[in-house]
Amino acid sequence: MAATPLIQLQDVTKVYVTGQIRYEVLKQISIEIESAEYVAISGASGSGKSTLLHIIGCLDTPTSGSYRLKGEEVSRKGDVELARIRNQTFGFVFQSFNLLGRYTITDNVALPMVYRGIARRARTEKAKTLLTRVGLSGFFGHRPSELSGGMQQRVAIARALANDPTVLFADEPTGNLDTKTGLDIIRLFGELNAEGTTVMVVSHDLRVAQHAGRVITLEDGRIIDDRRHAAAEPAETRTP
Amino acid sequence: MSPFEYLRIALEALASNKIRSFLTMLGVIIGVASVIMLVSIGEGAKTYIRTELMGIGSNLLIITPGKTETSGMGHPPSGGVHKLTIEDLQALEKRAPALAGLTPMVVAGAPVKYGNHSRDVLVIGTDEKFEDIRNLHVEIGSFLGKGDIEAHRKVAVIGRTVKKELFREASPLGRTVKIGETTFRIIGIMERKGTTLGIDIDDLVFIPVDTAQDIFDQDGLTQILAQVVNENAIERAKDQIRQVLVRRHAGEEDFTMITQQAMLSTAQSILSTFTYVLGGIASISLLVGGIGIMNIMLVSVRERTREIGLRKAIGAAQRDILIQFVIEAITLSMIGGIVGILLGAGIAYGAKAAFPVVPVDITGWSIATAFTFAVLVGVFFGIYPATKAARLNPIDALRYE
Ligand SMILES: Nc1ncnc2c1ncn2[C@@H]1O[C@H](COP(=O)(O)OP(=O)(O)OP(=O)(O)O)[C@@H](O)[C@H]1O
Ligand SMILES: [Mg+2]
């Protein structure tokens, strides 16, 4: 018997009830994700990919089923503990970036560090390092509205990395990017994964799927495919 | 997270919508300013009345004929009311040791003529003790003397206004005026005193008491003014007066005693009620200001639901969100409170400077109450929307349109 998996879902369902209509978005999902895995989630639009990612990211709660994080049942955790998990264990890149318009991108990236209690000077410095890493070194003082969609996406990624998360979640991180920038992001995720970060990415992008060590496919709220392929060599992703 | 971080987040949020923040504060500003202004006026009126009442002399007791106070059981209507007389006064002088002095007063309106100038004034018939008991003093010449009273002399002491109206710049001492049909010689001019409790002291004429009784055809006194030896003797003085006068008035208590303290406390309690009513009315505007804060906080929470969702998604606990919004609300109400205090006090002082007759008295308690109330309003009305915001599930908040 292997050690406790990092993430363990057992018969997780998510049901939305709107008036008389009961809509089952996730049906009996059971998966285990080990530490330092690189998982891609694919599936048609509306198949429940984002919902699954939100539940694993502790942003949403399942209707039934069990979710264990490092062996501990998440539903038993209190608000402060969940907040700390979202703050320090997880980093989340949303499908729509969710940046705060009245802050500069540096302050946006620094925000998770505010809730961690890191001093202003240190978090600004860290934010600038992260922005440089995603290729936005010249834009520290800009506000999100002054940047293109792809640049905002990269700010959102930098923010997700602010507290050096154990798990990085990303919902369609390359959806708004051109081929070249998309590739940079995929490379960055590969690097992070190589450094030991668990990565879970929802993506239609085939390159992401090729990069990931594991691809989970959803259809109508069910896992129809879950395949691992031994460290897919990213030959194709190298820029010519 | 340090308290400073919470404050910074709240201030940034307020600064990002300056006009709305200002309009919200305006409600509190107006509320606090009006509480302070109105309470200052009420308190000023109290101080004014106290000074005026104390200015008429100390430990005074006024005896008037007729019973105006009704005791619990009520007095059966009696045959006739005895007048207060000089003899009553003399009896009190002998047999009421708690009284330091007594002076009679016969008051009547009459025209005073000098040459072809004439003026309708209040004439007061009294004696030489009036000057000290009533704390009104002569400035030029002399007041009515004991000799003037005993010899029934037709002499008069006039107020400043009477002097000015009848004599202009000329000196009236030794000249004669006609009060009604009787000729009087002027022996003194009172010092300027202005208006006290609605009576223009400078527009009075004083003549000997029995002369007044003669020319106005009265055998009684309008009132007797008595000075009690000290403030602890007031009840004793009232008992002695009652004993002496009831005996002289065939067993009837057909007179009324009013003490200066009673007048003072009546006036003070009326004015306190007045102050509280004014303060209460102003508090309503403060409450309306508070509801304004709640309204803005609710709108602000709604508008920033996605922001709240995001903050929660990246690690803010419910507590952090709650504190942020409560601090925003408190900051609004506190700044509003401080500006309101400055504005209210400024207007009150301005009014005092511009119109010295307006009694204004800014009290610490009204400032403290208004400020505390403003902050409490902020906390109270900030907590509800803040709790609402903090409870949201991150993803529901993020999806909010
Ligand atoms: N709050 C909600 N109330 C009702 N239905 C919801 C709610 N949120 C999501 N759904 C439904 O759940 C289903 C799955 O949504 P989800 O966002 O997980 O899909 P997805 O696979 O991420 O799709 P896409 O690729 O378009 O992002 C959709 O049909 C959606 O309409
Ligand atoms: Mg989605």
Image (cartoon, coloured by chain):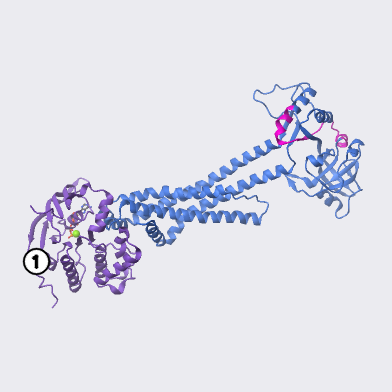
Chain colours: A purple, B blue
* Magenta residues (range): B210-239
Q: Which quadrant of the frame does ligand 2 lie within?
A: bottom left
Which x, y percent locates residue B301?
A: 35, 54
Where, by quadrant of the figure, is residue B341 drawn?
A: bottom right
Residue flagged by tag 1: what amino acid is it?
Ala
Res. A226 visible in picture: yes
Classify the position of the C terminus of chain B by image quarter.
Answer: bottom left
Is B153 rendered above or below residue A86?
Answer: above
Q: Residue furthest bottom?
A: A240
Please check the rendered image and state whether residue A201 is part of the magenta-colored stretch, yes or no.
no
Where, by quadrant of the figure, is residue A41 drawn?
A: bottom left
The 10 Å Cα crowd at callout 1, few under 14, some 14 to 19, many 20 or more, is: few
Which x, y percent locates residue B42?
A: 61, 46
Which x, y percent locates residue A135?
A: 25, 73
Please tell me which residue is depicted at 52% across the width and 51% down the height of the picture.
Answer: B32
Classify the position of the N terminus of chain B by image quarter.
Answer: bottom left
Is B168 rendered above or below residue B108?
Answer: below
Please tell me which residue is depicted at 71% across the width and 42% down the height of the picture.
Answer: B54
Callout 1: SS:
loop
Which x, y percent locates residue B177?
A: 89, 45
Question: In this rendering, would B333 be left or right of A90?
Answer: right
Question: In this rendering, would A32 be left or right of A144?
Answer: left
Residue nearer the viewer, A70 or A227? A70
Label 1 CB-ligand 1 distance < 8 A: no
Where, by quadrant of the figure, is residue A103 drawn?
A: bottom left
Question: In this rendering, would B152 be left or right of B2?
Answer: right
Q: Chain of mark 1?
A: A
Residue with the mark numbered 1 = A231
Res. B81 visible in picture: no
Please check the rendered image and state whether residue B234 is part of the magenta-colored stretch, yes or no.
yes
Residue nearer the viewer, B252 or B213? B252
Question: In this rendering, would B303 be left or right of B55?
Answer: left
